[in-house]
Amino acid sequence: MSETEFASAPRTAAAPSYGAPAYPSYPQPAQGPQPMQAPAPYGAPVPGAVPAPPPSNAGWAVAAVVFFWPLAFAAFNHSSSVYPRWALGDYQGAQYASDRAKQLGKIALFVAVGLSVLFFILYGVIIAAAISGIEDSTSGY
């Protein structure tokens, strides 16, 4: 057959069979018009969406090193476990680790402030005792 005869040849509606069974076409259910829904407000969670990972609060872990280093071990441990927990799908565990790292950093800051206040009070008492001791020794002539 030449190209012109092939192009003008009648075509059949049946597709060639390749040995695979033909799948029956099922009727599709009739769908009515969908009701209009208001768009979700900005920042509203979308159902089925993956939440953003919480912050690791590594800065608070560094603050724990600076202010009260014994708490820094736990703070860095929690800070470094935020992303792995989030990546495994443990969103609540990741949020807990983030919150705990922040909490430990704040506790370290408060302990450092408390120890500083106690140091200055003790230093003031020592200076007051030294001044009163000097006055007692010079007034004894």
Image: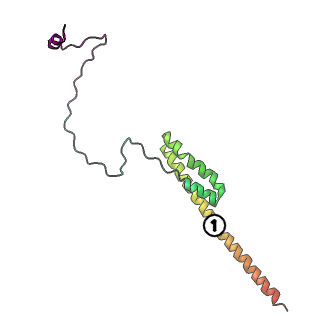
**Image: magenta residue range:** 1-29
Whether residue 83 is situated above or below residue 5 in the rendered picture: below
Residue kind at label 1, given as amino acid type: Gly
Whether residue 119 is situated above or below residue 101 in the rendered picture: below
Q: Label 1 neighbourhood size at 10 Å, few (<14), some (14-19), many (20+)?
A: few
On the image, the x and y values in percent for residue 106 come to 57, 59
Question: For the stretch drawn in magenta, what is the main secondary structure?
Answer: loop
Picture quarter with the C terminus: bottom right
Q: Is mark 1 on a helix, strand or loop?
A: helix
Q: Is residue 83 magenta?
A: no
Which quarter of the picture shows residue 13? top left
On the image, the x and y values in percent for residue 63 come to 59, 58
Q: Identify the residue shown where x is 66% and y is 55%.
A: 70
Question: Which residue is more in the foreground, 22 or 11?
Answer: 11
On the image, the x and y values in percent for residue 116 come to 65, 68
On the image, the x and y values in percent for residue 132 come to 76, 83
Question: Which residue is more in the foreground, 110 or 53?
Answer: 53
Q: Is residue 23 magenta?
A: yes
Q: Identify the residue shown where x is 25% and y is 46%.
A: 37
Residue lying farthest top?
1
Left or right placement of residue 98 versus residue 46 in this view: right
Q: Mark 1 points at which residue?
A: 114
Residue lying farthest right?
141
